[in-house]
Amino acid sequence: MSKYPGAKQLELIPRSRNPLVVVDRNHRLVRLCESLDWLELEATAQEIREGKLKNRAGRRPNLRVNLGAVVFMSVNRVTYREAEDQIRHYAPARYLCGLADSFKTPDFTTINDFMHLMGAEGLARLNEMVVRMAVEAGLGDPGVLVADTTAQEATMSYPTEVGLLGSFFRSVQKLGGRTGGKVKAALRDLRSVVNRGTKSIRTHRFFAKGKEERLKHTTTAMGAAKLVVKGLTEACRNTSAKRLQGGAKAARKKLEDLLGTMGSLLPQIDYWLENGYVAKNKIVNLFMPLVRSIPRGKVGKDVEFGIKWGTQRIGGGFILGTADAARGNFSDKLHVQEAVEHHVMTLGAIPTSFGYDRGGWSESNNAFLKEAGIHHNGMAPLGQAKWKVEGKHKEKLVKERARIEGDIGSIKSHRYGFNRPAARSEEMMIACGHRAMLGYNLNKLLRRQADEAGVALIG
């Protein structure tokens, strides 16, 4: 017999910890499980896995379970630990992952590793598969395409030169101590230089009075940073990392990447100190160097720090996205052709109607749309130029163009987490962006299917 906290009497028969749970067939996770083509999803995941593996050593992962976990995390924004807990104890989540008749559960590290294995490419391909599924079911119209650009904000504090230098000194001490050998010895020799730079930054932040004094301490920290970069780069060049294993090898790789980033950042800070202007393509994050400052002109948020995306919306409200972090702030004019090409590559059909804001208006883009066979060009004109489309087609494209703003706002909401994802690299930032679009499209697909079937979704 057992007695639970707060109970006033003992139970003659202990309660079962293996209860029978009946899952309603109209639960959204159940209907989602039965709507997806898991064989095609597994084939895609296996293709990506084989392209990234260095050898076939180790146990082959259960792709069906891990894909179910990815889908669950896309429609319900949860952390990896929360996903493990839900899949272990929540019956509809177990059904989605194909674990209804099993006692196994993937732990959070397994889900995290699989998410990194899939990466941005894998999540993008899964999202494209869902959009094609919607088109094949008659729920999406590939004849209508509307495009726009948006910014995906990174999870980071506001970047300053002093803040970046302080982060560099902290990271160097942490990583250099793990690598061992000549690198650790070089860091020990540079300890006084690191301390001088750290002290200058602390004085700049808390005690400096006036612009000239702050500039003096920034210059001192810059000099220390240059000496540290030079010393550690030489130490890394003169010693091999082949014998390093585990955490030491990973720390060495991070240190080398950090030193490479600082090699580009220090001249940019010098340019700012000499001229008072920010250098082009300024690095704003040491560990995500492709993140850029994106002018937005919003009230209360003039600048966003992150990656610029191009988004495409087909008729019916399903969305696709492309991100090219290496190009920084690519212009709206460039995205017009990319949006059409991505649409054709994904759905295999040229849209008959195309909508865009005035940022994409140019003679070359108008000529491209005409040559591509798009009959209704709904790009908003610049200045006094005339619309290329009239009547009901113009009204429809204007409405569709307005709806893409709502779709972008939805994926940026807390439910999907497009903005400020919990990612520490550009690759995973982009993967989280595709995962947000995947979750948005899956939920829209479920609602449309439920409306056609005349049922009410549960959960």
Image (tube, rainbow, N blue to C red):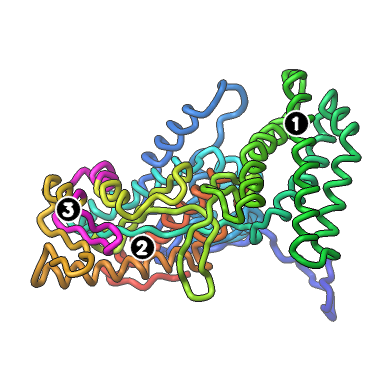
In this rendering, position of residue 455 left or right of residue 265: left
Callout 3: 10 Å neighbours few (<14), some, many (20+)?
A: some
Pick the residue in front: 308 or 454: 308
Q: Position of residue 265 (x, y in %)?
A: 64, 43
Q: CA separation, marks 1 and 2?
A: 57 Å
| Helix, strand or loop at mark 2 | helix
Q: Amino acid at mark 2?
A: Leu
Image quadrant assignment for residue 277 = bottom right
431 in relation to 261, above or below: below
The magenta stretch spans which residues?
341-364
Which residue matches tag 2?
A: 446
Q: Residue at x 79, y 72 (%)?
A: 11
Q: Position of residue 208 (x, y in %)?
A: 83, 64
**Residue 351 in magenta?**
yes
Which residue matches tag 3?
A: 366
Asked if residue 99 can be seen in this view, the reply is no
Q: CA separation, marks 3 and 2?
A: 37 Å
Q: Residue at x 51, y 68 (%)?
A: 302
114 in relation to 396, above or below: above
Q: Position of residue 231 (x, y in %)?
A: 79, 30
Picture quarter with the N terminus: bottom right
Between disc 3 and disc 2, whose residue precedes? 3
